[in-house]
Image (spheres, rainbow, N blue to C red):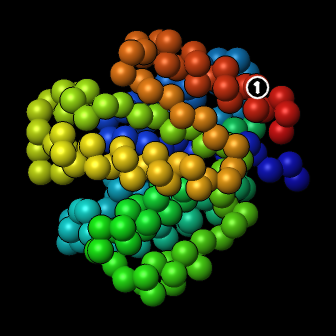
Amino acid sequence: MRKPLMVEFTGTPEAGKTTAVRSVANKLLNLGYNVSILKESAENLPEEIPKGTWDANLWMHYQTQSGLIKASYFNSDIILIDRGLIDSMFYGKKFLWEGKCTKKEYEKFENQFIERLFPNFLIALTVPPDISVKRRGGEGHLVNEEYIKSYNEMFLHYYEEITCKKTIIDTSRLDVYSMNDKIANIILSNLLVY
């Protein structure tokens, strides 16, 4: 059985990941491809687990792996993943760099990844801090300019470590239609060589 092309979306908060996943899926469906979406696991985080914590990342990581196992059995040509395993790995590293977990905790976490579930291709969407905050509708507890600046710096450092095929797109100067066309074309070109 041919494995579907798995494309993960990650990057800066408010860069357009979820919007792109939905819009690009529709575009690819209209071109005749069978497309499935794996939604961001954070959407289902139980309210008892505080957001932005090590435990929240662990919970989302296991939910994502579970969803990816299920998705690998879908009769799809393409699976679009809204914040998958690479995103989960980045957050683990981010917590390590911030001192919110120990090196031992991180190493145990890193050993929990199922390699066959990693994406074939990664699309990282980024925006500068001021654009992220503006798109969010103003500064909040987690999304503020200082946090996004730090996030982007850590993410760009981590991006260099990612070994799968990847691309990074700054969405701050792209309208939604241009962004979706660009992403769809990247996916289609990778589908042809897959």
**Which part of the image, by quadrant, shows the C terminus?**
top right
Does 30 sit left or right of 133 as displayed?
Answer: right
Instruction: Say which residue appears at 21% left-offset and 29% top-offset.
Output: 130
Does 108 sit left or right of 189 as displayed?
Answer: left
Residue 1 in sight here: yes
- Which residue is at the front of the view, 122 or 61? 122
Residue 5 screen position, x and y as percent: 73, 43
Residue 38 in sight here: no
Residue 120 screen position, x and y as percent: 71, 47
Q: Which residue is mark 1?
A: 189
As drawn, 7 above or below 171 = below
As drawn, 16 above or below 107 = above
Which image quadrant for residue 28?
top right
Which image quadrant for residue 42?
bottom left
Residue 111 screen position, x and y as percent: 59, 79
Dot 1 amino acid type: Ser
Residue 53 screen position, x and y as percent: 27, 69
Instruction: Say which residue appears at 78% left-offset and 32% top-offset.
Output: 191
